[in-house]
Amino acid sequence: MFIKRIDVCMGAALAGIIGCCGCSKPTPDSGASEPPAAFDVSQLNGPAALQQVHDLLDLGLRDSGTEGLRRAADFITQRLEEAGVEAEQQAFTDLTPRGEIEFINVIGKLPGRGEGIIMLGSHYDTKIGMPEGFEGANDSGSSSGLLIELARVMAAGPVVGPEIWFVFFDGEECWKRYSKLDGLHGSRYLAGQLIDDGRADEVEAVIILDMIGDKNLNVTIPRNVTPELVKRVFEVSGELGYRSLFSLFSMEVGDDHMPFLEAGIPAVNLIDFEYGSSPGRNDYWHTVQDTRDKISAESLEVVGKVALGTVNSLLCDPLGFSGQGAVDSRR
Ligand SMILES: [Zn+2]
């Protein structure tokens, strides 16, 4: 991903809307209908997610267009199917500074009752051209392993209104510098396909996970996301007792949420862009220091539970019905 300094302060706008929420459960004699079904956040298991990360890393590098990437795609497909999630590989070619490359998005889908789509995403390719010893443990092993664990928990039920998509994007990393021809290939392809199919309006929200395994967790949500989704993430992290681990970053971040935002789809990016040797530094990013010893089960569990809780919040109170005050990028 890339970063961009901006002057706009969104913090003030958010300060007034951070409160508590959630589905109020109807009492037995209230006559109210049952609250919408919700996923069991307590089932999200950090050690299980960490094992998925290690198993993925054991396969080696996952550079786009290589045998390593294809091996990782098959691994993810198999793990999704073992979890009870129907998975497909979406192969496509795209022009890059290295010429035409074949990319593979892996997409797992849980059926819903026909009320839209909620998408959870992570890229799984590794940064191209790194020196010997590069592992890509946090970027992009951590979020990919966690997304497999999220699929396992959510496949256990219940069946909810929206379809739940687990999307493992290829081609997030750029070769030289981010542009329409370099980086974000998988997310741009899927967003474009949703538009072409007339389905972009069906996607209620996209939650992208990236670099979320750092033992020293500090999720720095970038500025270029849908504010209403930030509000939900802050509410849920507060309810779970993790609020201090989630903050707004001072900058925009270019990541797989962007093509969806540009398509008018609400999207948020949960990323810890302070992955380094001391607080506030990001000096492990895209270096041989990005190794599995820096990743913890606890951090994976925190982010997994907040992501799952955010999905529950959307099931209870869909964005379309509570969007007053939110910036709906579709209009
Ligand atoms: Zn990267």
Image (spheres, grey):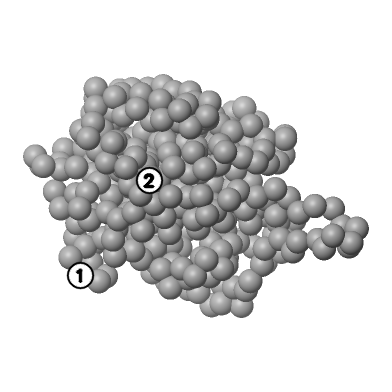
At 53% from the left and 70% from the top, the residue drawn is: 238
Q: Nearer the viewer, residue 105 or 301?
A: 301
Residue 19, quarter of picture: bottom right
Please name which of the two marks, 2 or 1, marks the residue nearer to the observer. Answer: 2
Q: Secondary structure at mark 2?
A: helix
Give the image location of residue 188, x and y in percent: 45, 36
Q: Secondary structure at mark 1?
A: loop
Q: Considering only order in the chain, which callout, 1 or 2, is on the residue closer to the N terminus?
A: 2
At 20% from the left and 70% from the top, the residue drawn is: 278
The answer, for residue 63, to whether it is visible in the render is: no
Q: Nearer the viewer, residue 114 or 185?
A: 114
Q: Residues within 10 Å of mark 2 (few under 14, many from 20)?
A: many
At 61% from the left and 77% from the top, the residue drawn is: 16
Q: Amino acid at mark 2?
A: Ala
Q: Is residue 254 left or right of residue 65?
A: right
**Residue named by callout 1:** 278
Give the image location of residue 147, x and y in percent: 43, 42
276 shown above or below 189? below
* Real-space Cα separation, disc 2 to disc 1, in angstroms: 25 Å
**Residue named by callout 2:** 49
Residue 70, quarter of picture: top left
Q: Amino acid at mark 1?
A: Ser
Q: Nearer the viewer, residue 149 or 270?
A: 149
Q: Which mark is residue 260?
A: none
Give the image location of residue 26, x and y in percent: 81, 61
Q: Is residue 211 left or right of residue 152?
A: left
At 22% from the left and 49% from the top, the residue drawn is: 292
12 shown above or below 296? below
